Amino acid sequence: MADPIPVAAHPWVYAARREGYDILPIIEDIIADMAYAGLDGIELMHTALTQDGAVERIAAASEREGLPVVGSSFGGAMWDAAQAEAVIQSAYVVTWRLKALGGKTLGVSVGNAPAPKTPEQFDVQAKVLREIDSMCSVAGIQMNLHNHTYEVENGEYDLRGTLSRFPEAKLGPDLNWLTRAGADPVAFIRSYGRRIVFLHLRDAAADGRWVEGLGDGATDFAAIAGALREVRFQGIACIELAWESDFQPTRPLRETLKLSREHIRNTMGW
């Protein structure tokens, strides 16, 4: 029998309305909310890990609440040769601080460019990704490619440009961003199969607008779960709530996380 899929959460919804997306000042509250919701862990944001004292503060809250750190997201303009070294150095700091916290995954976003990336820019992007992947391997962390819309729109132009140069890369797709880019998440899962080691889950209404929590929208999570079973997914699923700029929540965020966690259990079996 396959091991159960851990279900964690990402704190984007907390960060989105904070200056500089800075979650470190409220990290104790976030971790307490996620523990209350019955989640299996937290995926951090790299902007918290780059700050002084972050490891000690996060570790104390994680231990107190019994909520492990499963990994972190990380992003940068990896296609830009002028920024490549700075991105690699930032990734180094994040990777080793994440290792100190027991994290096992790093979901990377390659950065959007003002125009479709050139072959030369893809070459730079792949070189940066390989360096980050190498440092992750040394640290015992698995890197995966996270997507927003820009990587997977236009026939997956950006993602395909990366994979043609880095074919062994693992994927950590955000299934709702796939939908917003006009892609079918079920077809994507079937296409990329065992390459997928991490998932971001979010719900949306039939018109595409984000809803308060998982289960409040029209996303067919049961169909997604079926496709994941077909490809024998054995990674980590991560709830990443996001709200439209004009949205006003109707309940405490910890309750929405709890309901979202229950919805995944009821519809996906995790």
Image (cartoon, helix red, strand yellow):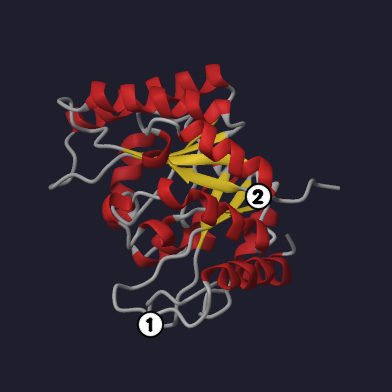
Residue that appears at 53% across and 74% down: 252
Q: Quadrant of residue 259?
A: bottom right
Residue 162: mark in rendering: none
Where is 174 relative to 198, above or below? Answer: below
> Residue reaching furthest right?
1
* Residue, disc 2: 231
Q: Does any portion of residue 234 appear in the rendered image?
A: no
Residue, disc 1: 207
Query: Residue visible at 48% across and 76% down?
Result: 212
The residue that appears at 35% across and 49% down in the rendered structure is 22
Asked if marks 1 and 2 touch (Cβ < 8 Å), the reply is no
Can I make out residue 184 in this image? Answer: yes
Q: Amino acid at mark 1?
A: Asp
Point out residue 262 in the picture as x, y percentages from the top left corner.
Answer: 69, 70
Q: Residue 123 is drawn in which quadrant? A: top left
Front residue of 49/159: it is: 49
- Identify residue type, mark 2: Val
Residue at far top of view:
138
User: Residue 72, position in %: x, y?
Assistant: 48, 40
- In the picture, measured across the screen, residue 2 lies left or right of residue 96, that is right
- Disc 2 crowd rating (10 Å Cα; few below 14, some 14-19, many 20+) is some
Q: Nearer the viewer, residue 60 or 96?
A: 60
Residue at image point 50% right, 53% down: 10
Circle 2 SS class: loop
Under tag 1, what secondary structure? loop
Sequence-wise first label, 1 or 2: 1
